[in-house]
Amino acid sequence: MEMKSASDSLAALGHTTRLAIFRLLVQAGPDGVNAGLICDKLELAPPTLSFHLAHLSRVGLIRGRQEGRFIFYAADYAAMDALLAFLTDNCCQGAQCLPTAAAPLKRRRTAATR
Amino acid sequence: MEMKSASDSLAALGHTTRLAIFRLLVQAGPDGVNAGLICDKLELAPPTLSFHLAHLSRVGLIRGRQEGRFIFYAADYAAMDALLAFLTDNCCQGAQCLPTAAAPLKRRRTAATR
DNA sequence: TCCATATTTCAAGTATTGTAGAAATAAGCG
DNA sequence: CGCTTATTTCTACAATACTTGAAATATGGA
């Protein structure tokens, strides 16, 4: 993952409304949730929700699939995994970074290690 | 971790310059790097760097410690860990979220599980 | 004390982003 | 076809964030 793509994703999550949407979808699972239901659960005006869903989609953190009149949005778990990997990549060069843990933060799977 | 604090941290990382600074510090290890050196490595104007360091400090992702005329900044690994935990918390309710993996994204240690 | 160096604060201009009403599009149903 | 529902696009305003020159602060050394 490149710096720009990672920072775009992080910026997308760096807003309480979008973070709430994303977590809702992460916890909802791969089937996703339709836009109207997200509106209700988070009490958002439809245009506001649409704006944020478009933002999250644009950076690749979520995906929408049309089903009849509904659009179901689901988290892109692979994108989230890649983002977490980017953050902890090459963490602390093997030194002990977390005092309470025995070992450094685990390096997550990356394109190179898959 | 609360929603607001998490989104503040993510927003802080959602900027190429700050993300570059943070990764530099994550990879540098617990001893940290002094501000001037960060300036040189990332080719930033001192006030610009200072602005971003203040931002990252304010949200708790990094810490500075004075040492003579220098201020060494280091990543706060515990804060990063908590942030990653927040994102994957209660991920996909046990369903399989990553098609290539056998199991869902691991739930990281949280205050509740420590 | 005076100077050089390290870093921050101030100030001001520019640019970007978030919100929500109104209107538009799209899909299914009678 | 016309109606209802689901969602998005358009528009315009308000608010916030980024950058950098200039000035200020602080630390150590001559």
Image (cartoon, coloured by chain):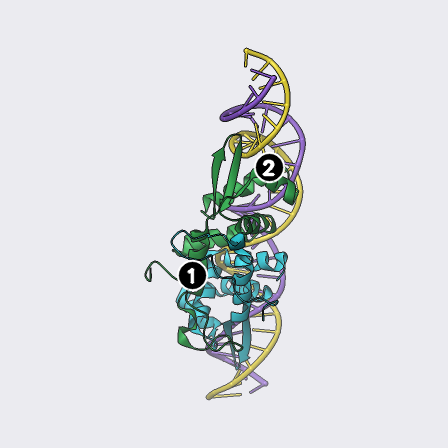
Chain colours: A green, B cyan, C purple, D yellow
Q: CA distance from mark 2 to mark 1?
A: 32 Å
- Quadrant for residue A112, please give it: bottom left
Between residue A81 and residue A29, name the one nearer to us.
A29
Give, as a three-letter code, the residue at label 1: Ala
Side (left or right) of A36 relative to A102:
right
Between residue D17 and residue A103, name the one nearer to us.
A103
Side (left or right) of B8 relative to B18:
right
B22 in relation to C26, above or below: below
Query: Where is residue C13 drawn, in percent x and y?
Result: 55, 48
Residue at the (60%, 48%) spot, across then down: A17
Q: How many marks?
A: 2
User: Which structural element holds mark 1?
Assistant: helix
Query: Where is residue B29 drawn, in percent x and y?
Result: 45, 74
Q: Which mark is residue A102?
A: none
The subunit carrying tag 2 is A
Give, as a three-letter code, the residue at label 2: Gly
Q: Quadrant of the N terminus of chain A?
A: bottom left
Residue at the (49%, 66%) spot, across then down: B46
B46 in relation to A37, above or below: below
Q: Is residue B76 visible?
A: no
Q: Which mark is residue A85?
A: 1
In front: mark 2 or mark 1?
Answer: 2
The subunit carrying tag 1 is A
Q: Which mark is residue A36?
A: 2
Q: Earlier in the sequence, mark 2 or mark 1?
A: 2
Query: Where is residue B30 drawn, in percent x and y?
Result: 48, 76
Q: Residues within 10 Å of mark 2 (few under 14, many from 20)?
A: some
